[in-house]
Amino acid sequence: MTRPGADQPTFYDLVGGEPTFRKLVARFYEGLADDPLLRPLYPEEDLGPAEERLRLFLMQYWGGPNTYSASRGHPRLRMRHAPFRVGPAERDAWLRHMRDAVDSLDLPADQHQTLWEYLERAAYFMVNTMDDAGTNPT
Ligand code: HEM
């Protein structure tokens, strides 16, 4: 029996739940750890906590548990990125690592497309400077 609007699997469920997001974000941070443009943006030496924040955000966004907001409050992602220089070069580097991570999941084509289109749109939305110097003040 299905009740309308209830018990419908979310996109989070469909792609495999937490293990899928764990894999996605772990792979993304592997790439980021060696990225000369992006790595200096991350204030903490240990990338583990940042990895967890991104994983919990994405899980929540796609219909998983609301753990992100329970600990961090409303995402307000553009505001949270304001302290960091996100120009076209940073956006493209971020998307390159994310593309590699999404590809590594081997999702069915429709799920792959849904996830990728969202991430690409979100990355364009996060840009806060059009200055393409590609360097951050040290
Ligand atoms: C476009 C290029 C992007 C760059 C260069 C970038 C960079 C950063 C940096 C430096 C941080 C701080 C690390 C931390 O302590 O958490 C951060 C946090 C975060 N980013 Fe991004 N980001 C980008 C795009 C995105 C996108 C597209 C999303 C979502 C789809 C996202 C989601 C997050 C989340 C959830 C956090 C943690 C926010 C918090 O709770 O404090 N970022 N990002």
Image: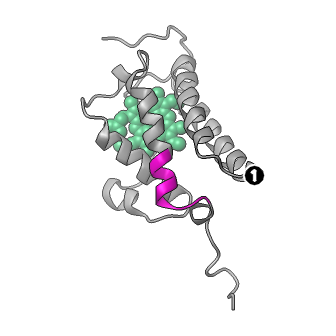
Image mark count? 1
Residue at position x 75%, y 48% in the image: 109
Residue at position x 30%, y 41% in the image: 48
Q: How is the image coloured?
A: one colour
Q: Main secondary structure of the magenta part?
A: helix
Asked if residue 39 is positioned above or below residue 112 in the image, the reply reads above
| Type of amino acid under label 1 | Asp
Task: Judge from the rendering whether residue 9 lies leftward or rightward of residue 68; answer left or right.
Answer: right
Residue 104: % across, % down:
58, 40
Identify the residue under disc 1. 110
For label 1, the SS is helix
Residue 44: % across, % down:
25, 31
Name the quadrant containing residue 121.
top right
Task: Judge from the rendering whether residue 62 lies leftward or rightward of residue 32; answer left or right.
Answer: right
Asked if residue 100 is positioned above or below residue 23 in the image, the reply reads above
Which residue is outermost to the right?
110
Q: Report the image quarter containing ligand 1.
A: top left
**Could you tell me if residue 80 is visible in this image?**
no
Residue 47: % across, % down:
31, 35
Q: Which portion, as a residue range, is magenta? A: 15-23
Residue at position x 71%, y 52% in the image: 108
**For this rendering, which residue is in front, 71 or 21?**
21
Name the quadrant containing residue 73.
bottom left
**Could you tell me if residue 43 is visible in this image?**
yes
Asked if residue 17 is positioned above or below residue 116 in the image, the reply reads below
Find out whether residue 52 is within the magenta segment.
no
